[in-house]
Image (spheres, rainbow, N blue to C red):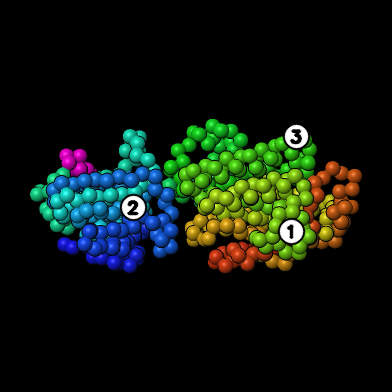
Amino acid sequence: MPIEFSKKLAAHETPIPGVVLYDLPVHGDNRGWFKENWQREKMLEIGLPDFRPVQNNISFNEKAGTTRGIHAEPWDKFISVATGRIFGAWVDLREGPTFGAVFTAEIDPSQAIFIPRGVGNAFQTLEDNTAYSYLVNDHWSADAQGQYTFLNLADETAAIGWPIPLEQAELSDKDRAHPKMADVTPMPARKILVIGADGQLGKALRKLYDGDPSVEFASRAEFDLTTAESFSSRNWKNYTAIINASAYTAVDAAETAEGRAAAWNVNVTAVAQLARTAVEHNLTLVHVSSDYVFDGSRRVHDENEPFAPLGVYGQTKAAGDAIVSVVPRHYIVRTSWVIGAGNNFVRTMASLAERGVAPSVVNDQIGRLSFTQDIAAGIKHLLEHEAEYGVYNLSNEGEPQSWADIAADVYELSGSPREAVSGVTTEEYFSGKTAAPRPLASTLDLTKIKATGFEPASSSNRLAEYLKNELINP
């Protein structure tokens, strides 16, 4: 069968998610033919994942009827034919609702197919002297073979219509002995690793992803960002994303000599190691940022505002953001005034209200609360919807308030008079105290994250729910 010349480069979806068949332009004349088998820029333009191949393999098959497979491997493959023609068969062997889905196609040099990790791959040569070529995005090793998932070529469930009957084909003994579908253990999905899983945000992520085996949680004791062993002891090939819910957040302590060193170590040095890991292993890195990267001179902050931190904590967060921004697959989620499980401003005010204390609270810092359940939901939304990588502001919705306004709301919702809360300026409140400078305006523009389809909950509604739950389960 002659090769079809001058096809337009095009992509065709298949019944198996992530498996895409490509038409490749082949240019021929009296000397033979030429094609661009792999051209990253053009392939990305039509939607091929940037899977970063590191190894190229060629399987030469002398006789028509040579049949190999079905092997699901722990890496992605871009398959093409250099000479000859094949009948390809692919079976989804990944955990999930499409397990067992089948796609078949005849492929000659004018076509190629992308096969993601966990999809079983097999082919049968239809011509003598067929050369089958494939790019993979991980180096082959003997250890990796233990992560393969196999399916028998003759499985009745897959019901693959081999052009040359298997009893007449050339097969290896190993391929003949592969298990049937009922005995196949599906290949598990790559995992999301949550670091800092015992903090306020980490606990919210635990609750949100409860029961999801594809999400793994690590407390500081289980993954200490500041130690090299935490990074070297993990097989990063088994992960697809890291959510960094860990940070040094002692704003005032960061102004001391000891605190400054600790803040830079956790918020910058450790984040640089995370970023390097993400780049080396093509992982998505989710990093949580802060309104403290700004000086508060603008009433509302959007994602493009230049950094202008006032104190050490803000400086370390800005430096961490700059590092993470060079990771090709990154989400920087910028929050303000975080409220979750553990000690925080709302809990403190509720405790004061219960004890009948009349506090003086800062009234010239303006912003919005960010409840951890909504930060967690926003992170999950960005990952699941594969939003464009970059920086996203994420707080709760509603009219910006001062800390004094929020404190008064807490008192009123707790059954105490609003008037018990009096307002003072930041300068007055910290007079005579050693404290870090604070931005006076912390309101974040939420336009960008809303454009992805995520709608943050109302701050006032979340506050009422939070207080109710805290009163019932203190």
Amino acid type at circle 2 is Phe
To which residue does mark 1 refer? 442
Spatial distance from mark 2 to mark 3, Cα to Cα?
51 Å
Tell me which segment is drawn in magenta. Answer: 172-181
Q: Nearer the viewer, mark 1 or mark 2?
A: 2
Q: Residue at x 72, y 47 (%)?
A: 315
Q: Look at 86% across and 48% down and name the residue there.
A: 430
Q: Amino acid at mark 1?
A: Ser
Per the image, label 3 sits on a secondary structure element best described as helix
Identity of the amino acid at label 3?
Answer: Glu
Q: What percent of the width, then of the height, locates residue 254? A: 75, 41
Whichever of callouts 2 and 3 sits on the residue coming sooner in the sequence is 2
Of residue 421 and residue 254, the one placed in the foreground of this image is 254
Q: Closer to the N terminus: mark 3 or mark 1? A: 3
Mark 2, residue position: 78
Placement of the N terminus among the 4 image quadrants: bottom left
Pointer 1 or 2: first along the chain = 2
Tell which of 118 and 348 is nearer to you: 118
The answer to whether residue 297 is seen in the rendering is yes
Q: Which residue is mark 3?
A: 258
Near-viewer residue (125 or 293)? 125
Residue 90 image label: none
- Residue 134 among those drawn in magenta: no
Instruction: Say left or right for 300 vs 20.
Output: right
Residue 117 visible in the shown view? no
